[in-house]
Amino acid sequence: MKWIIYTLLLVNLGFGLWHYRSVELNGAQAPVDDDNLRLVLVKEYLAQQEQAVEAPTGEDAATRCNTLGPFKNKKAANAIRKELISLGISAERRMSKDNTRKGFWVLIPPETTRKLARAHISELKDKEVKDYFLVVTGEQANAVSLGVFSRSDLAQRRYDEIKALGFKVKIRRVNLPLREYWLDWPKDQQLLPEVLDTFRERHPNIGQTDRAC
């Protein structure tokens, strides 16, 4: 039943996220998870759907919680969460997401058949190229993805690298999931201003407010 729900969610996402669906890994390792390069896989997107917290409605919306963030990654949020718990504050981590961050998708354009697309895969392997996958459904079916980048210069570098090997390559503008992490705890548990100041010394962009919980 859960997979039926996932399938419906993917269908409803439409064109904006079509390139994240139904990919097939081909022996290459996924790119490093950092701010510069992000190869988005279906399993990761579904994991984000599971972790996403929906806004409360009805009577629950009247309950307020303190919230601290945003943190750019899970590791940073977890470190502060441990410190809050040591202070007697029962903080829980929450992930919020948006798809407004622009990205640049480098790919070998779709072929007319899967056999031709796999021929590109074989040639990439022979030339020791890593970090690619075969797109198997959608408008770009039978394309070979070479990476999704958050910076145009990095996408251009990848484009030039693969083109120099003799492949036809293109860059497409896409929307990337933007993940941020927050820490929530009950309204009656107060964080001292001086403690918040020490957190902000390490994470200048965070702040504390309240939200419906």
Image (cartoon, rainbow, N blue to C red):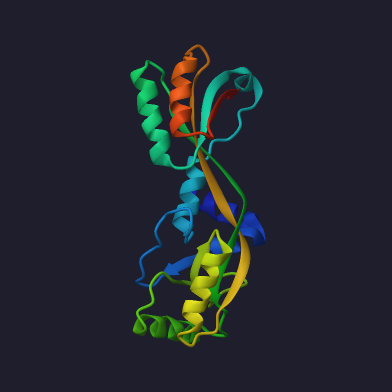
Name above or below for residue 16 compared with residue 192.
Answer: below
Asked whether residue 118 is in view, the answer is yes
**Quadrant in the rendering for residue 80:** top left
Q: Can you tell which quarter of the image residue 156 is in?
A: bottom right
**Residue at the spot x=47%, y=22% of the render?**
196
> Looking at the image, which residue is at 46% across and 30% down?
201
Q: Residue at x 51, y 78 (%)?
A: 160
Name the image quarter holding the C terminus: top right
Of 84 and 51, nearer the camera is 84
Residue 91 versus residue 146 in the image, above or below:
above
The residue positioned 49% from the left and 51% from the top of the image is 46
Q: Residue furthest top?
A: 188
Nearer the observer, 30 or 32: 32
**Percent from the top left, x then y, of residue 144?**
50, 75
Viewer can see residue 213: no
Instruction: Give x and y (percent) for residue 189.
Output: 47, 13
